[in-house]
């Protein structure tokens, strides 16, 4: 991934209203404000939490997959389907 993003960890709050949430830096500075329509209120907090969890864990998961793919390629060969799946996942992740 070439573009820089706001450093992690990100946090979130849904205490700004039933259809609004903020994703913030640890110091409380707003990164983005999210809103939803009334029909999605039941999943809004969970979706906001998923976004923050995904961002906060992205780098460590990518590095773990990269290392695993390398070690697996040494054991079973770089053309093994599992190694190829891992490389495709890394490509999709922008790595």
Image: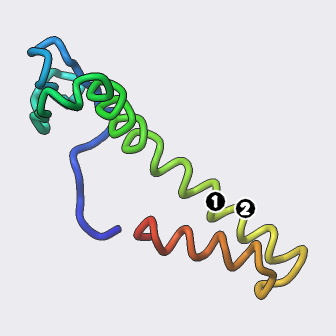
The relative height of residue 68 versus residue 26 in the rendered view (above or below) is: below
Which residue is label 2 attached to? 68
Residue 66, image quadrant? bottom right
As measured in the structure, the alpha-carbon distance from the residue carrying label 1 to the one carrying label 2 is: 5 Å
Toward the viewer: 59 or 53? 53
Q: Residues within 10 Å of mark 1 (few under 14, many from 20)?
A: some
Q: Which quadrant is home to the C terminus? A: bottom left
Q: Secondary structure at mark 1?
A: helix
Residue lying at 13% horizontally and 37% vertically, measured from the top left: 31
Asked whether disc 1 touches disc 2, contact meaning CB atoms under 8 Å apart, the reply is yes
Toward the viewer: 32 or 66? 32
Q: Which quadrant is home to the N terminus? A: bottom left
Residue lying at 10% horizontally and 31% vertically, measured from the top left: 30
Residue lying at 72% horizontally and 71% vertically, measured from the top left: 70
Location of residue 60 in the rendering, given as x and y in whole percent from the top left corner: 53, 47
Which residue is label 1 attached to? 65
Location of residue 29 in the rendering, given as x and y in whole percent from the top left corner: 10, 27
Toward the viewer: 23 or 34? 34
* Direction from residue 76 to residue 84 in the image, left or right: left
Residue lying at 40% horizontally and 70% vertically, measured from the top left: 94
């Amino acid at each position: 991934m070439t573009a820089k993003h706001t450093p992690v960890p990100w946090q979130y709050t849904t205490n700004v209203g039933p259809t609004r949430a903020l994703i913030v830096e640890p110091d409380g500075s707003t990164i983005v404000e999210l809103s939803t329509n009334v029909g999605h209120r039941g999943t809004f907090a969970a979706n906001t939490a998923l976004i923050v969890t995904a961002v906060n864990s992205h780098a460590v998961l990518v590095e773990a997959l990269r290392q695993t793919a390398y070690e697996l390629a040494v054991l079973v060969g770089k053309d093994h389907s599992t190694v190829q799946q891992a490389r495709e996942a890394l490509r999709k992740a922008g790595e």
